[in-house]
Amino acid sequence: TPGAYGEYVRLTAALLLRVPEGLPDIVAATNEPCAVGLHAVRQAKMQPGETAVVMGAGPIGLMTLLWLKKEGARHVTVSDLAAPRRALARQLGADLVLDPKEGPVAEQLTTAGVEQPPVVFECVGVEGTLEQAMELATRGGRVIVVGVCMKPDTIFPMVGINKQLALQFVLGYLAEEYAEALHLADSAPLTLPEPGDL
């Protein structure tokens, strides 16, 4: 039976990439979220010196954090409800880690002396987080929607209009980004978390 639960899976050879010799399977298995994070950061067209907030420190959010740091973002804040994920974000280089249960992220940024971000990556994908991302972004900012909300959601268009926000929805990755992520994992300039930690 075709499918990932089978002992063998039939695949098209032209779509396959060889896992580099010596790269642990457990690291190669993180390539998909790594490529998603790369695609999100590239689609955001980050400018030198820009700051960003990553909402959500699951596999996609953490990989987005890693790519933002690699691509030279000046400051990256990560927010997540789960303490273990916040700890992992801190370990992976987040400049500031916030718990949204402790109050609005925008207020916590102000208290910490951090400016409102020009770029917000929404990597949660549940109802309400897109609106929160729009409220968090600075005027003229960009909201990159990476999280996949599987239910209808509501936003207030006037928030986006008043701030002249750009909303960008991103999907997966390009084939060349998938290959680039795998090459980078092999050359190891990124410190990848263990999949079980995500």
Image (cartoon, helix red, strand yellow):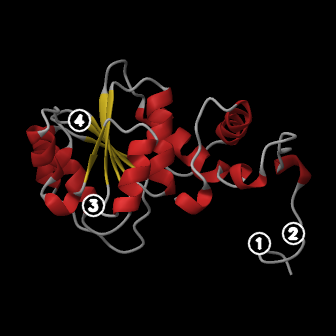
Look at mark 1 in the image and give the residue it sits on. 4
If you read the primary sequence from the N terminus, does the residue marked by circle 2 or circle 4 appear first? 2
Disc 2 to disc 4, how far (Cα)?
A: 44 Å
Q: Secondary structure at mark 3?
A: helix
- Asked if the residues shown at circle 3 and circle 2 are in contact, with their CB atoms under 8 angstroms apart, the answer is no
Disc 1 to disc 2, how far (Cα)?
A: 7 Å
List x then y, in percent, for residue 120.
Answer: 30, 43
Q: Residues within 10 Å of mark 2 (few under 14, many from 20)?
A: few
Disc 3 to disc 2, how far (Cα)?
A: 36 Å
Q: Secondary structure at mark 2?
A: loop
If you read the primary sequence from the N terminus, does the residue marked by circle 1 or circle 2 appear first? 1
Look at mark 3 in the image and give the residue it sits on. 129
* Residue 73 seen in render: yes
- Asked if the residues shown at circle 4 and circle 1 are in contact, with their CB atoms under 8 angstroms apart, the answer is no
Residue at 49%, 38% (x, y): give it: 66
Quadrant hosting residue 52: top left
- Asked if the residues shown at circle 1 and circle 2 are in contact, with their CB atoms under 8 angstroms apart, the answer is yes
